[in-house]
Image: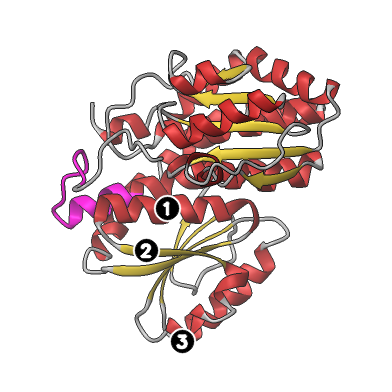
Amino acid sequence: MSMLSELREGPSIVEGLLRSAGQVDRVAEAIRSRHIDLAVIAARGTSDHAAIYAQYILGARNGLLVAPAAPSLVSLYGAPPHLRHSVVLGISQSGKSPDVVSVLAESRRQGAMTVAITNDSSSELAAAAEYLIELEAGEERAVAATKTYLAEIAVVAMLSAALSGDRKSRDELAALPDAMSEALRTEAQVGPLAAEWAGESRCAVLARGFHYATAREWALKLKELAYVLADPYSAADFQHGPIALVGAGFPVLAIATSGPAFEGMVELLGRLHETKAKLLVLSDAADLDGLGSVVRIPAVPEWLSPLVAILPAQLFAYHLARARGLDTENPRNITKVTLTL
């Protein structure tokens, strides 16, 4: 099975997760019953980007303070922070990363509520946690994670909805698979655009808010598949120095969807356009004409838009790698499971 076919499974996987929401509901009820207001998340690689999404969504929608676990404090320095009064989430597709497992094991030893989010219910991570949320994505053979990332951020969105307990959130989630299927249809536009970018070896990837995770994940896919030195930034941070890199022809990818960050993103893209930067923007807005190449994505509530926007981003990375004559199934120097201490 190729990476492209796995990528296209995203909508059906999310639909399946929504049908089996009981595991997420149990975790949400436990968080509420313990009156927890701090979430600590241990993750690496692609899963770390799901953690960034969680940081924004659980903060903005549920009032939780969300912090990264810094696994090296446990696995290398033997100096774990005090975690007893938090919920500690370990996110890992394989559930085999020793440093992530060590964080959950230490957290459980301290008496903290621990939750494993993984695609392997028999993994070390699952065994270390008090609660388990299975991604139910099926085996992912491609080295570059696509469908499991979608499953991870879907689970995070479902947890946010379960914690809020409102019907509107659940209705918005129910409509998500159709919007994701529509986003996959951008491939007809994305493929030719990727071919136009085949000569680029570097770029900046910009977004803000909920989509900072999307920018990070898009940049990672460009690095591991197309060997492009893609540097992701919050649009706010980008203006504090790195914008000096941009001159005529400098390649910039961006995500700009409806919400509080949209106006600022459009203003920044206008500035970059004036410098004659090469722009490609993923957006649900109809008024970005003249700001480079724009890929239209379905409009969904902002908190769910990362599940829609990442699909054309993944497609772009895949087709860019193909246009550069690279093997998308076997990226050099990396393996499917990376074991870090």
Q: Is residue 172 left or right of residue 239?
A: right
Q: Secondary structure at mark 3?
A: loop
| Front label number (3 vs 1) | 1
Q: Which residue is mark 1?
A: 218
In the picture, the disc for residue 310 is: none
Question: Looking at numbered disc 1 in the image, what kind of residue is underneath it?
Answer: Trp
Whole-number angstrom distance, CA of label 3 to CA of label 1: 24 Å
Up the image or down, 277 lies above or below 109; here it is below
Question: Looking at numbered disc 2 in the image, what kind of residue is underneath it?
Answer: Ala
Q: Which residues are magenta?
A: 316-331
Whole-number angstrom distance, CA of label 3 to CA of label 2: 19 Å
Residue at image point 61% right, 32% down: 89
- The reply to whether discs 2 and 1 touch (Cβ–Cβ < 8 Å) is yes
Circle nearer the N terminus (3, 2): 2
Q: Which residue is mark 2?
A: 230
Identify which residue, 178 or 69, lies in the foreground.
69
**Mark 3, other Cα within 10 Å: few <14 / some 14–19 / many ≥20:** some
**Can residue 178 be seen by looking at this rendering?**
no
- Percent from the top left, x then y, of residue 29? 78, 19
Circle nearer the N terminus (3, 1): 1
